[in-house]
Image: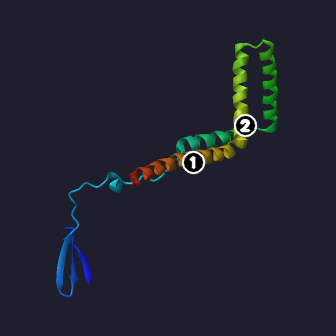
Amino acid sequence: MSILLDKEKTFRNDTNGGSQESSFAKSSRAEPAWTTDPLVLPRLNTRSAYAAGAKAAARLNATTATAKEEEDLLSERQRLLDRLFSGEITTEEKNRLDYVRWSLDRIEDARHGATLDALEIQADAYESFVVEVNKFYEQLNSRVQRPKR
């Protein structure tokens, strides 16, 4: 016994020299959409290479700060904060305070940023995964034929 398929989606069942033909052509009844729609599988997003490169360059630059420079920035920040809280700060000193805070943030980011980035990537991936799994679950539920009551 052999079953042969040809280009017209028919098969011939050859048994003992006899031949029977049948067609796989679509039936006249329409198939439910859930049987023919493709399933969309979960995908995770990737980060921008440019943004990652800029961040790495900024961290590399911040690692060149010495402990003495960091101590000087901390002392200057404290002095400027004392003037801010006493109400005697000038606009120029406020701008300098913003710059000193930014510089200290860059130094801290150079120290701990890579670890925090790894944590952020894992959290983003988990959140994306949950969203995609929920979408997939909804697709599966929409395709399940439930018995009518």
Name the one closer to the observer, 4 or 111: 4
121 shown above or below 84: below
| Residue located 17% across and 81% down the image | 19
Q: Nearer the viewer, residue 31 or 61?
A: 31
Labels in figure, total: 2
Q: Is residue 25 left or right of residue 131?
A: left
Figure coloring: rainbow
- Residue 102 in percent (x, y) is at 69, 29
User: What's under tag 2, amino acid-wise?
Assistant: Ile
Under mark 1, the amino acid is: Ala
N-terminal-most mark, 1 or 2: 2
Would you identify the image quadrant in which residue 124 lies?
A: top right
What is the x, y in percent for residue 120? 63, 44
How crowded pointer 1 is (Cα within 10 Å; few <14, some 14-19, many 20+) is rated as some
> Which residue appears at 52% of the width and 45% of the height?
131
- Which disc, if any, is residue 125? 1
- Left or right of 85, for residue 145: left
- Mark identifier at residue 107: 2
Residue 116 image offset from top left, x and y in percent: 67, 43
Work out whether 66 lies above or below 73: below
Residue 44: in sight, yes or no? no
Q: Position of residue 52 (x, y in %)?
A: 58, 43
In the picture provided, is 95 more to the left or to the right than 51?
right
What secondary structure is marked by label 2? helix
- Camera-nearest residue between 130 and 89: 130
Image quadrant where one finds the N terminus: bottom left
Residue that appears at 31% across and 53% down: 32
Secondary structure beneath disc 1? helix
